[in-house]
Amino acid sequence: YIPSSLRVVHLTASSVPSYAFYDCTSLAIVTLSDTCTFIGTRAFWGCQALQSVSMPDRVTHIGDLAFAHCSTLYRLTLPSGLTELGIQAFMNCTNLTEAVLPNALTDLPASVFSGCSNLRRITMGQQIASVAAGAFHGCVSLSVIDKNGSSPIIAAEGNQAFSQIWNADGHTPTQPNE
């Protein structure tokens, strides 16, 4: 049982189990220990007050829907050791404005940032090579996609990875490092 009034968590465990803080609507600040390597499926799903998550660089896995519907989360820097990111991991984080992806990550899964309507800037690591269907679907504020590397991004034709991301002026986001 997790009390509904819980606002701040400092976890000392090496992993965050699936559904650990599912729908804990008052949780605002999470700090994970330096030993944490794994965040399970829906671990923080629906934590509507969650503003800040401090993750150590040892985190290698963030599960499906782990932070989905965390509508107050506004900035995100993913750990440098992250190699596995689950589908819809940050779906409907409507106040998210910026996300920085690590160099170790090679693929963006389906609908990973779908519905992040205020996402303005995404900085991708050097190894991102493929983007799955709907990864940025509905990211209507996205104006800059910055790829820190020379390898091209591959989105299979017709997969709509970047569907519905046109800006108010009718243009697609700038991609300065392609």
Image (cartoon, rainbow, N blue to C red):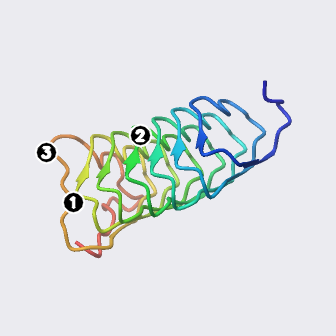
- At label 3, counting other C-alpha atoms closer than 10 Å, the crowd grade (few under 14, some 14-19, many 20 or more) is few
Give the residue at x 58% y 42%. Answer: 15
Residue 127 position in % (x across, y down) = 28, 63
Residue 87 position in % (x across, y down) = 39, 37
Q: Which residue is mark 2?
A: 86
Marks 2,1: beta carbons within 8 A:
no
Q: Secondary structure at mark 1?
A: loop
Q: Secondary structure at mark 3?
A: loop
Indicate whether 175 appears above or below 64: below
The image quadrant of residue 5 is top right
Q: Which residue is mark 3?
A: 157
Frontmost residue, 74 versus 33:
33
Task: Answer with left or right where residue 27 lies relative to residue 153.
Answer: right
Give the residue at x 68% y 34%. Answer: 21
Marks 2 and 3, how far apart in space?
A: 22 Å
Closer to viewer: mark 2 or mark 1: 2
Frontmost residue, 41 versus 45:
41
Indicate whether 148 appears above or below 169: below
Give the residue at x 20% y 50%. Answer: 155
Closer to viewer: mark 1 or mark 3: 1
Q: Which mark is residue 153?
A: 1
Q: Secondary structure at mark 2?
A: loop
Indicate whether 150 appears above or below 48: below
Amino acid at pointer 1? Ile
